[in-house]
Amino acid sequence: MKLLVDKINDSISYIKKYSLINPDIGIILGSGLGLLADDIENKVIIPYKDIPHFPVSTVEGHKGQIVLGTLSGKSVICMQGRFHYYEGYNINDVVYPVRVMQKLGISKLIVTNSAGGVNTNFSPGDLMIIEDHINLMGTNPLIGKNLDSFGQRFPDMTEAYDKQLLEIAQQAAHSLSIQINKGIYAAMMGPSYETPAEIRYLRIIGADAVGMSTVPEVIVATHGGVSVLGISCITNMAAGVLNKPLEHKEVVEVASQATANFIKLINRIIQGI
């Protein structure tokens, strides 16, 4: 059985056969937010299914490919679609692409997601900069033998979301006259949506938005010394807020409607990094 580091090297060798770009910024695009990758110039597209040891996206709204190239003058590697714990993957598979991006040389990671609004002041279509998170997934991607070549056994999570990147994001939103919120993201295992009682609990403990991703990737990025900016697109109000059923179709549709502002914002952020 191959060691994880050997698998990562296999993946990198395959990617480098098609692109010699040394990306500084990694981007993970959540449900319905994949159109940002269309703005990448001089792009090289590699399907996940072709990359050794990569999982494959199974969720609607996730294209399942990496895109390497230039965005707003910066070298980037973009994931059009992510992997979720609820898809049945081992948690180490969920974060595997982040490890690959780290070894490719990224120093910053922009991670995005579609999320349910727990804060009743939010509305579908709003964007939220993640200030911090609450891990309620019942697992952690660092469980097991520590990968010393990436980071220390007990990484500090005090500033998992980089304050300087957060400030750049706020300034970018202001310059574009885009209304943006700040808040706390709670991660649940899924794939069922939360109950109204669970949403009331999340509100009590300080969450502003809830989703089923992002936190494992942020933990691994922090472990590897990568600065993180997190942005949620509020695609629906969480269970019990509007007393209406929740559907993934609505999540993808609202995310697509918010895409124009999202794309402008990410481009402006990257210009400022």
Image (tube, rainbow, N blue to C red):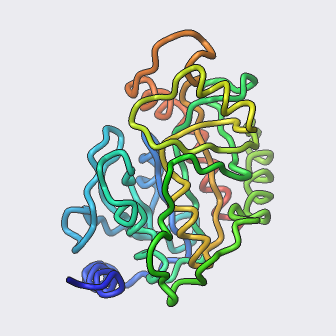
Q: Is residue 108 left or right of residue 203?
A: left
Frontmost residue, 20 versus 196: 196
Residue 172 sits above or below residue 117 on the image: below
Q: Residue at x 25, y 56 (%)?
A: 56
Residue 170 sits above or below residue 218 on the image: above
Q: Quadrant of the N terminus?
A: bottom left
x then y, percent, for residue 187:
56, 45
Frontmost residue, 231 versus 54: 54
Frontmost residue, 221 versus 265: 221
Residue placed furthest toward the bottom: 149
Residue 118 sits above or below residue 272 on the image: above
Q: Residue at x 46, y 33 (%)?
A: 256
Q: Is residue 114 left or right of residue 4?
A: right
Q: Residue at x 43, y 55 (%)?
A: 37
x then y, percent, for residue 259:
52, 38
Residue 205 sits above or below residue 48 on the image: above
x then y, percent, for residue 96:
38, 69
Frontmost residue, 134 versus 119: 134
Number of marks in the rendered image? 0
Q: Residue at x 49, y 78 (%)?
A: 102
Q: Quadrant of the C terminus?
A: bottom right
